[in-house]
Image: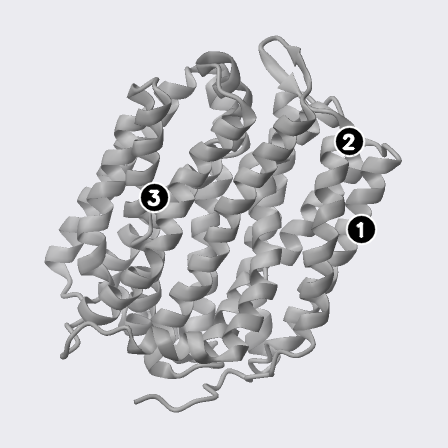
Amino acid sequence: MSYFFRTLMKSRGSMLLFLPMLFLYASSYFQRTAVPGTIFNQLQTDLNLNAFQIAAMGASFIYIYALSQTIVGMLADKYGGARIVTYGGLLFCAGTLVFPLLDSPGGLYLCRMLAGLGASTMYLSLVKETDHIFGHKNYAVVMGVVYFVGYGGGLCGTLPFERLITVFSWKNVLLGSGILSFLLYGLFLLGKRMVPPSGVTPGKLSFAPFLKVLRNPWSWLILYCSTVNFAIYFIIQTVFGKKFLEDFTGMSSSGAAACIFALTCVCMTVLFSSSILSRLMRNRRKPLILFSTALCLLNTILMTLAIYFEFSGSVFALCYLLYAVASGFSVVFSMAEQEVNAPDTMTQATGFINMINYLAVALFSLLVGMLLDAFGGREVSGAVVYPKEAYLTLFALLLIPSALSFFGSFLIPETRGKYLHHGE
């Protein structure tokens, strides 16, 4: 750890560039969490949208975010992360600022796509600049900080956002967040002028590094296990988790939002500590991967039983927290994905796992919306309350991918922090 702090002191000038990028990333995470999950009922009552339309609002952000990852990875490798955020940050700010000013579903979807396209540049740009500024030896610890701060933005999209919209209109709160994003973008541009970004890599843009990742069977195995953990957690956090607690357990809006707040806090803590824990375990990745997939499976079994036997709300709150623990090892999956490939594919491997994670989230969001609408529900004060059978079917179906993920994780090789293949 002393080496880490020495490197940090040497790199303190670069913080003028790194910190605004980091907080812009946190702002993008706020948008992913706050819309539509926290305002699910408000979108139903104020805009008369059904579950599928609301899920599609989240998916419109996530689809464009995910599908951009391959190109963003190549551009970040070629031109450096800061140059990519210069353009992506502007798109993100524009989408978040205009969104609360519109009422039509088409316009709202378009703004979410624009914000998603801009947000897609931020994570991989941070990956690139983190490796450039701090070096790969400190990469795990710094990325733990990046995840922690990013998820902190998501944390603000849960209970704090829910409490604010009880005082102010949800549109006004989202407008304020868009203005804040523009201010952060301005600080980033100022820092970019004062701190030279990473250099441009010679040569042409090429899909060759990405094709290497695609041809590696270990990439797909780690990817699947990571995606199951991440998708279940993220959908609970951002789409139906709060809604389920209100519908099934009768929790108040603030109580349900507090559970999502706690879930995000736990995930943040595990994200930060898991990277340090892996470092203390001499960069072992597999024990933490096995633990996370086992926890995801066991918790899905518990969640299904809890719905069937109609346990109290405290049991579901506990299940939510356990999902957060399982997803908190995302940084370990990401490092393993990089290390089963080669150093020259680091950004591409990270982009690949990020892309599939979010594509699964987008697809799963729509399927959840269709499932809830298929079971129907009763209308209460303009919002639809979905039945027990809908949620029971959902978690029973989730047992299948969770079980496959657990058994598949035994086949993942241990990398011990080393790349298994040589770069070009």
Q: CA distance from mark 3 to mark 1?
A: 33 Å
Task: Give the camera-side residue of 5 and 275.
Answer: 275
Task: Tell me which label, 3 or 2, sits earlier in the chain.
Answer: 3
Figure quadrant of residue 374: top right
Q: Which mark is residue 389?
A: 2
* 144 versus 268 height, above or below: below
Left or right of 378: which side holds 185?
Answer: left
x%, y% of residue 90? 20, 43
Residue type of the residue flagged with mark 3? Gly
Q: Disc 1 vs disc 2: which is toward the camera?
A: 2
Helix, strand, or loop for circle 3? Answer: helix
View extreme (left): residue: 193
Task: Check residue 116 in the rendering and tell me which mark sits there, or answer none.
Answer: 3
Q: Which residue is mark 1?
A: 301
Front-most of residues 401 and 161: 401
Binning the other alpha carbons within 10 Å of mark 1 as few (below 14), some (14 to 19) or many (20 upward) gives some
Whether residue 235 is visible: yes
Position of residue 48 in the picture relative to residue 296 (left or right): left
Please, is residue 146 above or below residue 262 in the view? below
Amino acid type at image mark 1 = Ile
Q: Amino acid at mark 2?
A: Glu
3 vs 2, front mark = 2
Say which residue appears at 28% left-offset and 73% top-offset.
Answer: 207
Mark 3–mark 1 CB contact (< 8 Å): no
N-terminal-most mark, 1 or 2? 1
Looking at the image, is mark 3 or mark 1 earlier in the sequence?
3
Q: Which mark is residue 227?
A: none
